[in-house]
Image (tube, rainbow, N blue to C red):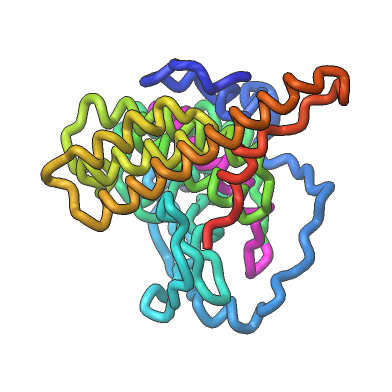
Amino acid sequence: MRGTGDNRGKFEGPEELGLRNIEDKPLHQDDDKKKNPGPLSEKNEAKYLFDSEVECPVCHSRITVKRIRRSALRLVSRDTDSMPIYEDINPLFYDIWICNNCGYAAPQSSFSQPLTKVEAELIQHSITSKWRPKEYPPLYDANIAVERFKLALVSATVRKARPIDIAMLCLKLGWVYRTMEDAENEIKFLNQALIGLKAAYDVGPFPVAGMDESTLAFLIGDLSRRVGNYQEALQYLGRVITDRTAKSALKEKARDQRHMIIEAQRAAASEASKTQETPDSTSEQPPSKGLKKLFRKNK
Ligand SMILES: [Zn+2]
């Protein structure tokens, strides 16, 4: 399987991120075979949004972007890897801002940060030259969010952004796929996120993307568990558990995770011994029960 090996520290480019042929394709070709039904609570969703104007750091035009009234958000729950779930709206869907004039796309937290002349030229050369402006509907669904995150990944890789920035984009894109229950793509992008997160963990300095050392170790451990890399998961969770500076709540969560993995490994082992006892019962390999269990939705 691609992306699961120990290729830490290096993204291999847009293709590896699932952004094939950006060299030849006009950016923004629609492939909306799967149309999503409109959001159920459109009225509710709209009340969290408002328009705002910002300047594009590449072409310097003024563009209108969507912002979220964060003070109005109500957190429902958080997954173990910190993916938040809010009432009525998923702010993640609105996280990417796009300049429709030049095609530059980035998360709103970094969109307005000035770029170097070289970075701007890279965007203009590789993106603006084949950019086709596009209008989005007033409310975004998961499919739109996927498209916008991929455009942000193209911008980030073209301007050679830091691995941690690309990793955070991959993590959030993985989360969008989780809301779609698309486990295959979720795992693919969590694996990509792990490459940059592990590289950042190795070199620091902390905080990295707002995380201290033990928080990042926990995240790497949890993501490794989610992609089925138990060995590495145990290794990073172990670091949290033995870290004297880690908060006790985080250590507790790390112990829970470790317990889940050991249980899953046990289940997988007993499953394997059962199939060995009856070798000719079926030729098809069912997915490991232990692995499945780990992908059950978090409460
Ligand atoms: Zn622009």
Is residue 154 at all visible to an observer of this figure?
no
Specify the principal SS of the magenta part.
Answer: helix
Instruction: Note whether 197 is above or below 143 in the view shown.
Output: above
Corner quadrant of residue 240: top left
Region of the chain picked out in magenta, as a range: 137-160
Across and down, in percent, residue 61 comes to 44, 53
Instruction: Note whether 229 is above or below 34 in the view shown.
Output: above
**Near-viewer residue (61 or 287):** 287
Q: Residue at x 20, y 31 (%)?
A: 204
Q: Which residue is drawn at 39% across and 19% down?
A: 8
Across and down, in percent, residue 25 comes to 70, 28
Q: Which residue is drawn at 34% across and 52% down?
A: 253
Horizontally, residue 35 falls left or right of residue 216, namely right
**Near-viewer residue (26 or 255):** 255
**Near-viewer residue (45 or 208):** 208
Q: Which residue is drawn at 58% across and 78% down?
A: 46
